[in-house]
Every structure is written in C-alpha cells, then in structure tokens.
Image (cartoon, rainbow, N blue to C red):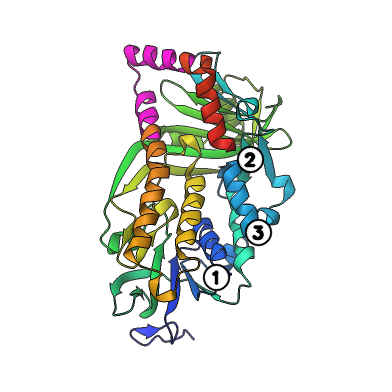
Amino acid sequence: MSERRRPNEPLTDTPVDVAIVGGGPAGLCLAKALADSGLALMVLEQNPSSALANPQPDGKEIALTHASRALLETLGVWSGLPSEAISCLKDAAVFDGESDQPMRITHADGGRDCLGWLVSNQFIKQSAYEAVADQPNLRIVNEVSVDRTSLTDRGRRVHLADGRHVDARLVVAADSRFSNLRRVTGIGARMRDFGQSMLLCRVHLEKDHEHVAWEWFGYDRTLALLPLNDRMASVVITLPHEHIERLAGLDQAAFNKEVSGLYRHRLGKMTAVGERHLYPLVGVWPDRLVDERLAVLGDAAVGMHPVTAHGFNLGLKGVELLSKQLIGAPPEQLAHPKRLAAYQRQLRLASLPLYLATQTVVGLYSQNQWPVRILRRTMLRLAGRMTPFRRAVARQLTG
C-alpha cells in the first residue's frame, strides 16, 4: 500500500540549515564539505538510493586537475576511488583538420608527472555517496522532485511534488544544467544548443596511447580520445544529431570499422567495449548564481561544452568557494546577502574566462570556410611554438 501524504506535510519538524537539491557529485561533495560544521543538512534527490550507492556506467570520463584532486582528497572522496579506475593524463595533443602535426601540451610544461587524471563518473558518484552516507547531521531523501519554492519569515521552503515540503535557512540548487529549481526560482539562463550530440564509448586500442589525450577538430566533426589504463580509451565523437544516431545504431563490426577510420587508424584498430552513450550538446550560463536564500552550484551554475573536459572541476571550485562562506557562520547568517554575493563573484571570476574561451573555440572550429580553416591552423601552430602559452595552459591544470 502506498504511503499517503498530507497536503504540505513537512519532511522534518524543524528547519534544516542547508537543503541541497540534487544528489550528484557536486551536491554530495558540498554535503561532505559541510559535514563537520555542525550544520543540519539535507539532500533531496529524485533517484532512488540504489542509484547513488551503485551508479551505473554513463560513459563519462572526468578529467580532474591537481586542485580538484586535492579537494577530493580533503573530502575523503579520492581515497574511495578504485586505484585501477584512475588513469594518469600525461600529455595532450590538439589536431586541426587533416594535419598530422598537433599542438602538444606536456606534463613537463606543467612541472608534474601528470597533467591530471581521468576517472569514470560512476566511481566519483559512488565514492561521494559513500563519503556522506553515515554523516549523523545529514539526511538524504530519495525519490522526490521539486515542484516550487517560496520564501518564509526565516528561510526558504522547498515544495515537493508529493505534497511535502522542507524549510531551510539556505537552499542550494545542484540539480543539473537544466535545473528545475533554478527555473522555478526565477533565475534565467542563456542556453546554446550546438546542434550536435556527443557519443561516448570505451574502446580497446591496437596501439598504445601512451596516456596522451587527443582533441581533434575536423572540418565536420570533433573527436577526442581519453586515455585509460590497459590500452583502453574513451572515444568522444561529436556530430550533428542525425549522423550520431546513425553511428550509434551500427552493429559491432561496422561500428569498430567506422570509428577506427574516423581516427585515421592512428592507434590501429579500435574495438568497442560496453555500451554507447549519447548526449545532446547544450551550453548553459545562468543570469546569476544566487537569489534570496538560494545559491546555484555545479552544472546548474555553469554548463560547459565538454571540449575542455573542465565542467566538474568548476563544480568542485564552487563547492570550495561556497563551503568557505558557510563554514563558521552563525546559522542565522548562512544566507546573508554578502556571503552569497561573495560566492557568486568568486565563482564567476573563476568560470567566466574559461566559459568564454570555450565558446570562442567551439565557434571557431565549427566553421569550415577556407579563411577560417587557415586562421585556426595558423593559430594552432603559433600556440604550439609559444612555450609560455603551453606552460600557462599546463599549469592551469597542474596548479
């Protein structure tokens, strides 16, 4: 028999200090960052607890910078990752068109053994959940969705679709780049549909990738190759929607043959392993990151094009900045406008240059007129010869 819900029934008799809407990696990492602060926390998640405890593969390999690793170590998330699932990203090569001479950014440019690391998104999700699962001051409520929100005398009330509600001093929207909470709160966002979709698939390589990541800007497609352990890699293929659906629908032999050809057989035969995953490419930039007693976090705060593989790093930067504003604050001052304004200002400063640069790169490399081809090839060659530029890019990753 299903449980009856009384209209507007509270989830808890007393308000919580921070209610986080969204139990993805960013939301859970914020919960962990605040776990020892003495604050009463709640996470509201639409998926069942089994999806958090045992997430399924989604095809996403997350590139983590040195700063992100340091924060995950502090939060106790890094130690929960399977060691065999962590792949060193030594170098990066950027190709243009048919050129065989890429711009190469090396770990030596960054002064470290690795530029960063690649970890499957499912393991980050799982470890983040395990890190918060037994926190005494945190309650995770699963299988709920937000209907609307409203201000009260002492906080913000989150109304759920099942008729219940929760009152909080501060509400955090961490419910994806298509955030429903952000929308119902009245925060607009500029969205750019790139008219393409992304196919993700693990492949086994005939030749060794030497832990070098590839970004290949073709004239009608964008390809990436993310090096994993044991001569495995994740291929990231970006094409118009109809073309990517055709590719995804090929049988195994035809798919292997076509993908190997797309990558010009530079690493020999590619053999697909596991499922193929499709995602539409949409960039999101909200008009603002805060409202009265509300902050926006993770992909809800900035939805990056995956060409830089930097989205989750910005999500962790948001966790760091917001938690610094909240830890040590008196409960009644958690949502003080100055604290939220400082968080917004700092995260905007950290994310806007990368967001704009990414938009520029994507715009430049989505045009195929001859003058644009010549311009971008010239720019890439010049950048490859400029040691200070390469070092600047590398040290952004290595810190």
Amino acid carrying label 2: it is Trp
Q: Is residue 82 magenta?
A: no
The residue singled out by tag 2 in the image is: 117
Q: Earlier in the sequence, mark 1 or mark 3?
A: 1
Near mark 2 (Cα within 10 A), the count class, few <14, some 14-19 or many ≥20, is many
Residue type at numbered disc 3: Gly
In the depicted structure, whether residue 357 falls above or below residue 169 = above
How packed mark 1 is, by other alpha carbons closer than 10 Å (few <14, some 14-19, many 20 or more), is some
- Residue at 55% of width from left, 49% of height from top? 58
Provide the residue span drawn in magenta. 358-381
Q: Residue at x 28, y 64 (%)?
A: 185
Q: Which residue is mark 1?
A: 37
Q: Which residue is mark 3?
A: 76
User: Which amino acid type is shown beneath numbered disc 1?
Assistant: Ser
Q: Position of residue 255 (x, y in %)?
A: 57, 32
On screen, residue 358 versus residue 131, left or right, reads: left
Q: Earlier in the sequence, mark 3 or mark 2?
A: 3
Rendering coords of residue 366 (x, y %): 36, 26
Cβ–Cβ under 8 Å for marks 1 and 3: no
Magenta part, dominant SS? helix
First in sequence, mark 2 or 1: give its number. Answer: 1
Q: Residue at x 50, y 76 (%)?
A: 40
> Does 380 appear in magenta?
yes
